[in-house]
Amino acid sequence: MTAPPRPEPDWARLAALAGLTVVALYVCYLLLAPFLPAVAWAVALAAMGLPLHRRLRRAVGSENLAAAVSTVAVVLVIAVPTVLVAVRIGHETRGAVRTVQEQAADGRLRETVARLPGVGGLAAELDPGEVERQARAALAELGRRSFGVIEGVTGAALQALTAVFVLFFCFRDRHHLLAAVGRLLPLPPADAERVIDRADGAIHATVYGTVLTSALQATTGGLMFWLLGLPAPVLWGAVMFVLGVLPFVGAFLVWVPAAAFLAADGRWGAAAALTGWGLVMAGVVTNAVYAWVAGDRMKLHPAPALLAFIGGLAVFGVSGMVLGPCTLAVTVALLEVWRHRLPGGAPVATVAPPSAAAGR
């Protein structure tokens, strides 16, 4: 007995379904776009904190409790150093303001500024009254824009709360989330697992590379501060580490003012040495180290790994630190699937299985 013939597909209905799907996906993107940085960092932190969560899960026996403790631990590891550094920077800033006020009152500030190259002549021509008027106008403008500052702080707090919320569920429901992603991918299970594994490797590569380069800057920066006789080298090394992890910030917020201080104090050799260290470390060494570490872990050449990191920052902002390398890794994995599926390509069974999948 022969099987009945399959009905011809209704192309009009399929086209309508495809159109509705595209519209629905676009609307979902609009809904999630404001929280993209929070979600990206929550996923990255969950991937990094997974070994700790596994140990806690075995120790406490409860997935909910282990996820809660893991989330609190990750938040504390990030929040405590950041708060300490912020407090210290605020303390140093208040001290610097007091010093400038004292020097301005007894006339030493003009002498100090006059010793700076390229600035001394301009400073001598400035009218103190005009400088004061400009400073008052800048403060008034800052006051008028205080609403924007408050709005920015509120948005950052909302992003942080969203990241913590998503982080908890990434710990607790990671198996269900990974299974759901695998089902949504239009790929066989082995290929879907391969794509997820490459994305996981990209996340680890980004975080490890960023932490390693920040630690390198902090260590060498602290040594430079110590060799040049600058105060609190260990403290400022820790500050450079925290700032190095943050995108669009960096350790230059520490070494540039320090180099200016050395120059104003007449120590031109020390200022040149610190400036040379900062330029070489920030522009050459850290990028080379990141490209080497991330490229090796992502199984890619260092050049595209570094370009994905920088391009991700340019396209996605802060979340691009994770999304850029992850997008490149997923794209490469999909191209590999095509290569193995096309005629003449190697069978999928001959491809080495994902290395990280077994540990999830």
Image (spheres, helix red, strand yellow):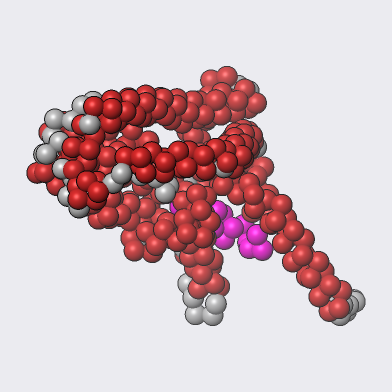
Q: Is residue 133 above or below residue 73?
A: below
Confirm whether the magenta stretch covers residue 359.
no
Residue 194: tell me if it is visible.
Answer: no
Where, quadrant-wise, is the N terminus in this rendering? bottom right
Decide which of 258, 330 is in the foreground and name it: 258
Kindly identify the residue that appears in the image at 57 percent across and 19 percent down: 60
Question: Dominant secondary structure of the magenta stretch?
Answer: helix
Decide which of 21, 143 is in the foreground and name it: 143
Confirm whether the magenta stretch covers residue 189.
yes
The x and y percentages for residue 70 are 54, 27
Q: Is residue 249 above or below residue 71?
A: below
Kindly identify the residue that appears in the image at 65 percent across and 59 percent down: 185
Q: Is residue 61 left or right of residue 220?
A: right
Q: Total number of numbered labels?
A: 0
Q: Is residue 206 left or right of residue 290?
A: right
Q: Which residues are magenta?
A: 185-202
Decide which of 163, 106 is in the foreground and name it: 106
The x and y percentages for residue 334 are 54, 66
Kindly identify the residue that appears in the image at 78 percent across and 70 percent down: 18
Q: Quadrant of residue 164?
A: top right
Kindly identify the residue that appears in the image at 14 percent across and 47 percent down: 272
Q: Is residue 7 above or below residue 99?
A: below
Residue 147: tell me if it is visible.
Answer: yes
Decide which of 166, 159 is in the foreground and name it: 159
